[in-house]
């Protein structure tokens, strides 16, 4: 089973896998998740963390692996499913720069997305 964001379907889910949770504790788990996201909105995401993750992503885009073609194919399919521009999608630098500019304009970009 996968966990996290999965864009592979038209209605892209965010999946959290939990083990050993009793049925009567489900509401407590939802409360913990909501409280945690609320703390992120309140306290913000550290700029250094965002910069580090963006740098890591940039490096990963330049690293060619043995299954590079399959990864490109998978990305193209996901982009197509969501109505994106496939040619634009292949140039990830455009998207990274767009996100950096958005973060300069709105340092609370991620916090605002969580609030939505």
Image (spheres, rainbow, N blue to C red):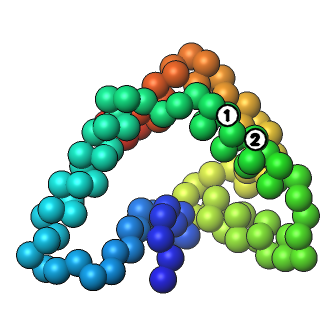
Residue beneath the point at 67% across and 28% down: 100
Question: Where is residue 72 drawn, in percent x and y?
Answer: 79, 66
- Whole-percent x, y for residue 41 in the image: 35, 33
In-front residue for pair 107/84: 107
* Res 50 visible: yes
Q: Quadrant of residue 22?
A: bottom left
Mark 1, residues whose alpha carbon is within 10 Å: few (<14), some, or many (≥20)?
Answer: few
Disc 1 marks which residue? 51
Left or right, 36 with reference to 88: left
Say which quarter of the image contains residue 102.
top right
Q: Is residue 11 left or right of residue 53?
A: left
Q: Say which mark, if any, is on residue 62.
A: none
- Residue 91: image x %, image y %? 81, 46
How far apart, in angstroms, are the residues tagged by discs 2 and 1?
6 Å
Residue at (33%, 80%) from the top-left corner? 19
Please rate how many residues cluster around mark 2, counting C-alpha atoms within 10 Å: few if below 14, some from 14 to 19, many from 20. Answer: few
Instruction: Kindly identify the residue that appears in the image at 64 percent across and 59 percent down.
Output: 79
Residue drawn at point x = 32 percent, y = 29 percent: 42
Tell me the residue that label 2 is attached to.
Answer: 55
Q: Nearer the viewer, residue 34 or 64?
A: 34
In this view, 35 is above or below 83: above
Percent x, y for residue 55?
75, 41
Q: Which residue extends farthest left?
A: 24
In this rendering, the answer to whether 6 lies above or below 34 is: below
Q: Secondary structure at mark 2?
A: helix
Tell me if 34 is positioned left or right of 97 in this view: left
- Location of the C terminus (image quadrant): top left
Do the residues bearing badges 2 and 1 touch, measured as CB atoms within 8 Å? yes
């Amino acid at each position: 089973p996968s966990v996290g964001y999965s864009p592979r379907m038209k209605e892209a889910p965010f999946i959290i896998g939990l083990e050993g949770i009793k049925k009567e504790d489900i509401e407590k788990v939802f409360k913990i998740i909501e409280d945690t996201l609320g703390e992120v909105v309140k306290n913000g995401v550290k700029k250094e963390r965002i910069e580090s993750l963006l740098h890591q992503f940039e490096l990963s885009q330049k690293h060619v692996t043995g299954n590079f073609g399959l990864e490109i194919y998978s990305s193209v399919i996901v982009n197509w499913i969501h109505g994106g521009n496939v040619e634009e999608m292949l140039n990830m630098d455009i998207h990274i720069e767009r996100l950096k500019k958005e973060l300069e304009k709105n340092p609370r970009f991620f916090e605002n997305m969580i609030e939505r």
